[in-house]
Amino acid sequence: MKYRNLTIDLGNGLKTNAQLTIPAMGKGPFPGVIFFSAAGAGSVLPPTSPYAEMAEYLSERGFVVLRYDKRGVGPNFTISDSNAWGNLTFNNLKQDAETASSVLLEEPEVNATKKATLIGHSEGNNIPPKSCRR
């Protein structure tokens, strides 16, 4: 697999960290997958995260996977912006999911003519069905 770190601009000067996991073999463009994380301030990016293991599993099978941290969450499970985190709403999560989905589909390794597969866990299950429509 190959990895590419990204910074996603969420608007109003707020950014979040993200990572693409890209198949190392095969000829792209590949189908895309995006993960929406559970409730809380846990980061989806560390290599010890279950999301990292799932991303690797999917990339080994020909998918480009995007993982991103919620607004206000920084490395090592820290709150990097207490205002963004403390005032987080469902609408923020929805807008962030739509932005992240657009970022994924704009990546050159992703087959943008197909829709991305959306995977959510816990709170993340509430976001994809209500947003990310293209």
Image (cartoon, grey):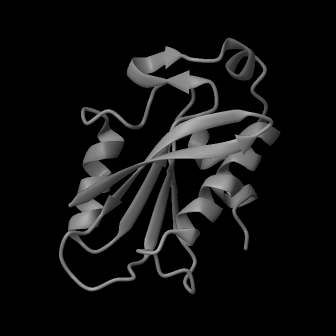
Q: Residue 26 in the image: state x and y as whole percent.
A: 21, 82
Instruction: Inspect this view and state whether residue 41 appears.
Output: no
Does 47 appear above or below 29?
above
Residue occupying image coordinates x 66% and y 46%? 126
Q: Residue 127 in the image: state x and y as whole percent.
A: 67, 49
Residue occupying image coordinates x 74% and y 33%? 13
Which one is nearer the viewer's eye here, 35 or 15? Answer: 15
Residue occupying image coordinates x 64% and y 17%? 81
Instruction: Inspect this view and state whether residue 120 appears.
Output: yes
Which one is nearer the viewer's eye here, 121 or 103? Answer: 103
Instruction: Place residue 102 in its image quadrant.
Output: bottom right
In which quadrant will I find the C terminus?
Answer: bottom right
Q: Residue 30 in the image: state x and y as whole percent.
A: 38, 79
Q: Residue 64 in the image: state x and y as whole percent.
A: 38, 66
Q: How many marks?
A: 0
Residue occupying image coordinates x 27% and y 86%? 27
Does 104 appear above or below 9?
below
| Left or right of residue 120: residue 51 | left
Which one is nearer the viewer's eye here, 97 or 29? Answer: 29
In which quadrant will I find the N terminus?
Answer: bottom left
| Left or right of residue 105: residue 129 | right
Instruction: Place residue 46 in its image quadrant.
Output: top left
Does 110 appear above or below 4?
below
